[in-house]
Image: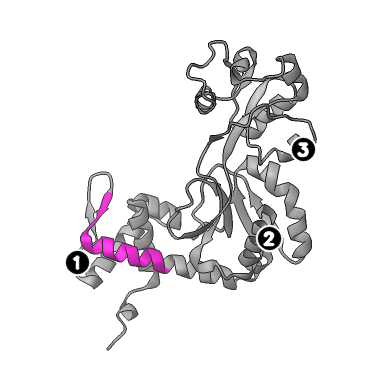
Amino acid sequence: MSDVLATIPLSALRTFDAAARLKSFTAAASELGVTQAAVSWQVKALEQRLGQPLFRRLPREVELTLAGERLARATAEAMRLLRGAIADLSEESDAVLSITTAESLASQWLAPRLGSFQLAHPKLAVRLDTGPRMYDLSREGFDVAIRSGTGDWPGLECLYLFPSEATPLCTPEVRQQLGGLARPEDLANAPLIGLDAAWNDWFAAAGVTERPPSAVGRLIADLQVLEVASALAGRGVALGSPVLFATEIAQGRLVRPFDTVVDQSAGFWLAYPAERRRVRKIAAFREWVLAVVG
């Protein structure tokens, strides 16, 4: 029996994969660095070879047919495996571990600890990204991620690290100025830092059925680390992670007046493509990070 792939160029399948995933010939052309006409021609040629349409052409987008959906599932998996295998065989890839995570976690928890990992693996460089995007680890050049969420991302093996929760944090001086903060209601006179919605969630978790009317947020920042930095400067009380700011709490620079925490997500997770679990650099980082949190 002849090989059915012998008559279909890999470039056609790669083009189809991009168009199916992005649901747009124009977007696929942009991703692949070709013209929209080239994408359209490749897809048309593939349809002719298969003898059936793969897309329905709509005014502003394209939509997969049943045959297209079936092929799209197969090509997505095949491209994911190819990218992983090629990345693993790359000499440059072997020498660099690429990690993507949130800026607050990177600066407060990961970066201060990475030195011990690099001492244990001196031939492995670390590239750390803290951009806001959630990258596709199967196709966008990153080996592992530490993410907050539910840990059920398709195609990824996810290992729970620690909770993603927040509690009021302030300096000892601010706590004293506010009368000791013996009860959650005492925050009525406190300058609160952060989103009103986040504070409403915390007050509810603390059993305060009606938020004190004068407990109004004075500063809102894009990053938790910036809000807690304001608290460290004595500007008020911020909601922060007792895990990420454990060092400042242990040093006495910050105090947590209350045990009550509010969950911000289901937790922080180490994630990587499931088919790459045995790659040496990923296995090394997995072993290290689980030992750190364990």
Q: Is residue 112 above or below residue 121?
A: above
Q: CA distance from mark 3 to mark 2?
A: 23 Å
Q: Is residue 23 above or below residue 166?
A: below
**Stretch in magenta:** 62-78
Quadrant of residue 259 in the image?
top right
Camera-side residue: 265 or 91? 265
Which numbered disc covers residue 262? none
For label 3, the crowd category at 10 Å Cα-Cα, with few meaning under 14, some 14 to 19 and many 20 or more, is few
Camera-side residue: 13 or 227? 227
In which quadrant will I find the N terminus?
A: bottom left
Instruction: Name the residue beneath numbered marker 2.
Output: 288
Tell me: 76 left or right of 201. left
Instruction: Name the residue beneath numbered marker 1.
Output: 52
| Residue 68 falls within the magenta-colored stretch | yes
Please tell me which of labels 3 and 2 falls first in the chain.
Answer: 3
Instruction: Name the residue beneath numbered marker 3.
Output: 250
Residue 254 percent across, percent down from the top left: 74, 30
Secondary structure beneath label 3:
helix
Secondary structure beneath label 1:
loop
The amino acid type, in three-letter code, at marker 1 is Gln
In which quadrant will I find the C terminus?
A: bottom right
Foreground tag (3 vs 2): 3
Q: CA distance from mark 3 to mark 1?
A: 66 Å
The amino acid type, in three-letter code, at marker 2 is Trp
